[in-house]
Amino acid sequence: MSLLLRSVSVSMAPAGALLVLLAASPAHADGAPVAPTAPVTAASAPPPAAVPPPSLYTTGATGADARPADPDAGRTRFGFGANLTTDYYRAPVDVLGIGLFLELGQTENAGVWAPLVRLTGARAASDVTSGMTSASFTWMTLALDGCPIQATLVAQRVWIRPCARVSGGLLGASATIDGQALDAHKPWVTAGVLARLQWRPVGPLFFEVEGGAAYAFTHDAVSLGMGAPVLDPALFEPFGSLGVGLTFP
């Protein structure tokens, strides 16, 4: 009897060990064993994704980098320069003068809407001979231009601006006839339109050419009498100029 009990206990020992192992291991609800997971530590955590540096370029709809974004776009600028002016009159036919201008507005790369205001002071003179007598005519002019928009022809290089102009000044005439000095002065006012083409080759330097026409509100003839030449301004006066200047910033 004792021999039989000993053999039964020896045969049940492996089954008991198996039950103990199954009870110690975790299992799913369906009975499948689950492997124990190792705790997540800072050393085993994945590194954070690298953040790319900010781009100096603008990105279009296709995601490709476009030309560099201009940090000066839309900024207010100050400019000054000088120009050679010309005006048409009936007599004399052409009048040349020198002008200086100051302007304030937005940088050319601001877009289509880029208001600009320019103030120009100019002086022109001409000698006119009629028969045996001659007279000197002098124009002192102050002009105000308003240019609300612009069109870019070459990016950051060439622009064109339509402008409106109001100008006025003083027209003086003088002559010496038979030893007698004669002089006369007459104020005048005009209003007109013009187009200005500018080219910036490098840095703040720019060159320009402009042309337009103005209506003369005061276009009466200026005469000194005694056979002196008469200045007869035209009702519509074409004008133009060539200029050079600097802008800041």
Image: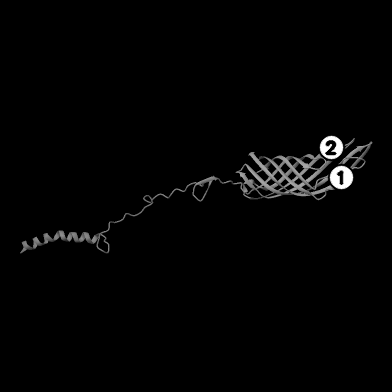
- Categorize mark 1 by other alpha carbons within 10 Å: few (<14), some (14-19), many (20+): some
From the viewer's side, name the closer residue of 37 and 167. 167
* Residue located at (14% from left, 59% from top): 13
The answer to whether residue 56 is visible is: no
Q: Position of residue 242 (x, y in %)?
A: 72, 39
The C terminus appears in which quarter of the rendering?
A: top right
The amino acid on which the numbered mark 2 sits, given as a three-letter code, is Asp
| Residue 15 position within the rendered picture, expressed as x and y whole percent measured from the top left | 16, 60
Q: Which quadrant would residue 1 be assigned to in this image?
A: bottom left
User: Which residue is tagged 2?
Assistant: 127
The kind of secondary structure element at disc 2 is: strand
Query: Which numbered tag is attached to residue 154?
Result: none
59 left or right of 187 in image: left
Identify which residue, 55 or 229, lies in the foreground: 229
Whole-number angstrom distance, CA of label 1 to CA of label 2: 14 Å
Mark 1: amino acid: Val
Give percent across and percent down for residue 64. Answer: 49, 47
Vertical relation: 146 (above or below) 96: below
Whether residue 210 is visible: yes
* Residue underneath mark 1: 222
Residue at 70%, 47% (x, y): give it. 104
